[in-house]
Amino acid sequence: MSKAFTKETDDAADDVELDSGPALPAGAKNYITPEGHRRLQDELKRLVKVERPKVVESVSWAAGNGDRSENGDYIYGKKRLREIDGRIRFLTKRLEVAEIVDPAAQKSHDQVFFGATVTYATSDDREHTVTIVGIDEADADRGRVSWVAPVARALLKARVGDVVELRGPRGVDSLEVLAISYGDSAT
């Protein structure tokens, strides 16, 4: 078959950061909890010391098997290597600019700041509990929201009993702060 009818992949075209994660807002600091920082460091160490060497070994073995253009192990291995390298670059950059904020060191436990776990009621009397964390730690399923999320922005600096407005796609909702804690104590 003529090369004109085959799809050749260009390594440079595929060299994108596939797992770049959420973008930091322009000019914003990359706040992160000590736990989140440790998790990112652990992931970076695992990628550099375990994952990448395994894939490099696999690609080397596959390259020794001859024709690379039809060698699935080689093609997949090179793609996986690009993904790992992209994630390593992303994690390295994120960790370089990370500003660790320890919620336990927060002195004002009666006000919502980064790291606070906040229980609030919506205007329809439903209670929600969220923990305000860094962008790289956000996980809605576990009640962990990024400090730049609309709900976190609305709650920041509020105190127990305060009613704040959350502006969203469905309009404005009122949130009443019921409790604030920083891991060890609730207000």
Image (cartoon, rainbow, N blue to C red):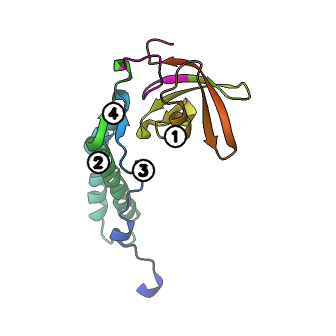
Query: Picture quarter containing residue 71?
Result: bottom left
Q: Nearer the viewer, residue 107 or 20?
A: 107
Instruction: Label the magenta part by its dominant secondary structure.
Output: loop
Q: Secondary structure at mark 3?
A: loop
Q: Is residue 126 above or below residue 32?
A: above
How far apart marks 4 and 1 lie (CA) works out to 19 Å
The crowd level at tag 4 (other Cα within 10 Å; few <14, some 14-19, many 20+) is many
- Residue occupied by mark 2: 93
Q: Earlier in the sequence, mark 4 or mark 1?
A: 4
Residue type, mark 2 in image: Lys
**Labels 4, 1: front one:** 1
Residue type, mark 3 in image: Ala
- Residue occupied by mark 3: 23
Residue 150 placement, left or right of 52: right
Give the quadrant of the N terminus: bottom left
How far apart marks 1 and 3 lie (CA) works out to 12 Å
Q: Secondary structure at mark 2?
A: helix
- Residue occupied by mark 1: 149
**Residue 66 pos. (x, y %):** 30, 69
How far apart marks 2 and 4 lie (CA) works out to 13 Å
**Residue 121 pos. (x, y %):** 65, 24
**Labels 3, 2: front one:** 3
**Labels 2, 1: front one:** 1
Residue type, mark 1 in image: Ala
**Labels 3, 4: front one:** 3
Give the numbered dot on residue 37.
4
Picture residue at 40% right of the left edge, 71% below the top: 70
Q: Is residue 16 above or below residue 37?
A: below
Picture residue at 37% right of the left edge, 20% below the top: 106
Boundaries of the magenta span:
106-118
The crowd level at tag 2 (other Cα within 10 Å; few <14, some 14-19, many 20+) is few
